[in-house]
Image (spheres, rainbow, N blue to C red):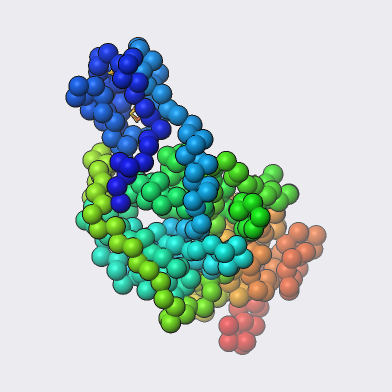
Amino acid sequence: MNSNKISFPLQVNTDLCTACGICAETCAFQAIQMNDGPEINPQACRLCGSCVQNCPSEALSIQENTETQTEEQQTAAEIWVLAEHSQGQIAAVTYELLGIARRLADQSGMRVAAMLLGHQLEPMTADLIAYGADTVHLVDRVGLETFIEENYARVACDLIRECKPAALLVGATVRGRGLSARLAALLHTGLTADCTELRMDTESGLLQQVRPAFGGNLMATIVTPHHRPQMASVRPGVMQAQEPDRMRSGEVIRHEDYTFCPDERISVIHEEDEGCQTASLSQSRVIIGIGRGVKNKETVAEIEAWAERIGAAVAGSRAAVEANLIDASRQVGQTGHTIAPDLYVAIGISGQIQHTAAITGAKRIIAINPDSNAPIFRIADYGWVAPVEEALPKMMQILNELGV
Ligand SMILES: Cc1cc2nc3c(=O)[nH]c(=O)nc-3n(C[C@H](O)[C@H](O)[C@H](O)COP(=O)(O)OP(=O)(O)OC[C@H]3O[C@@H](n4cnc5c(N)ncnc54)[C@H](O)[C@@H]3O)c2cc1C
Ligand code: SF4
Ligand code: SF4
């Protein structure tokens, strides 16, 4: 992979440039070196435009390269998935994205590729192929062993500029959200966050990116007609992974001679994994949701102890987070996690759309609430009209007897 082959949007007009060096001084990212004139390092440049504004000779410009865009649209025939991983494991959301990418590609005669960045990742390539990738683009090198958003964005950006995929799907996780936004800005393309459905218009090749808008009151279908790649993020638990097929064959493209310029402003001193609850939310068969109606920490502690006994995870509404009943990392809803357990027990949750939009994947919902008009009862399979203090002990007993 050689990013120098690609024409970069920031250009210097050498006829106008007086080699004054102001642009190099202005650039906060040390992306310009002065030699005979300014030399731009495309890997370091964020296209912020500061040098363009400060050049006294108007010698710099950032081009909206429509020719390149048109060429990209013609050459791209792949749907890419950014493979997320941690501690040697591919994230479940990556398999879910490969599942939807596979379905879209099969409908439209395209191919699926996974982009895998990091260090010592070779064993993961087989899994990505088994879950639906035709190709794995592997950048495996020292400097990428720790996830640093700026560095991953540089590498991903170079890879995308070179290979020009039609679309890029990213998990709407903590890492994926930051990285996808950064990539969209670097690549000058659109990004639809938190899609709940993806369709491919086979005639136009446009990815239809469906997501809730206006607080979930309508579903918007968004397309990216003029820029590539078409970027969409999807939360964990929204799409379905396909069954892995260990007999599938695929190609691993190892970008071995690729070099990049790490962002030296950032180094990771210490890493701590506090993702166990997050992981348990995406993996648990039973999740107990705490709402503002639970009211006090004593009852929360009781619910947590019960959850631990039965192997359930505990989540909460935003109001419960705001009431300090539960940690923000466990919030379920429009601005939290999307979940799809076998059973969701909503305790003291009213059932506003911002919460319920994220639990539609639950196979069964039990709601406990003293207000019989609470909207949660409209989507619950079983409702218990009672305060938590009365219902919880009985509920625990019943579920214990059922062996849940
Ligand atoms: C842009 C935006 C994004 C949002 N994102 C999210 C999100 O990601 N997740 C989210 O959850 N919310 C989100 N919200 C907030 C959402 O609109 C609701 O305010 C929130 O979900 C309400 O939480 P709740 O049901 O716990 O509280 P409430 O709506 O206050 O409901 C409490 C419920 O407890 C019941 N109750 C009272 N006493 C008891 C008792 N003794 N025992 C049992 N039940 C009792 C009440 O009858 C009531 O139904 C968002 C809002 C906006 C505007
Ligand atoms: S600021 Fe403008 S004129 Fe000065 S070196 Fe940079 S591009 Fe050339
Ligand atoms: S566009 Fe911004 S980041 Fe790029 S060289 Fe100019 S000042 Fe530096």
How many discs mark residues in the rendered view? 0
What is the residue that sits farthest to the left in this orientation?
Answer: 35
Pinpoint residue 328: horizontal percent, then vertical percent: 50, 53
Relative height, residue 262 to residue 87 (above, below): above
- Quadrant holding the C terminus: bottom right
Residue in the image at 23% along x and 54% along y: 257
Left or right: residue 68 versus residue 125 is right
Left or right: residue 348 versus residue 159 is right
Pinpoint residue 185: horizontal percent, then vertical percent: 46, 39
Query: For this rendering, which residue is in front, 220 or 284?
Result: 220
Pinpoint residue 326: horizontal percent, then vertical percent: 51, 57
The picture quadrant for ligand 3 comes to top left
Left or right: residue 225 versus residue 95 is right
Residue in the image at 64% along x and 58% along y: 202
Does the rendering let one see residue 65?
Answer: yes
Pinpoint residue 167: horizontal percent, then vertical percent: 52, 53
Does the rendering let one see residue 93?
Answer: no
Query: For this rendering, which residue is in front, 377 or 250?
Result: 250
Residue in the image at 26% along x and 28% along y: 39
Query: For this rendering, which residue is in front, 278 or 313?
Result: 278
Asked where in the image residue 300 lies, by quadrant, the reply is bottom right
Residue in the image at 42% along x and 39% along y: 186
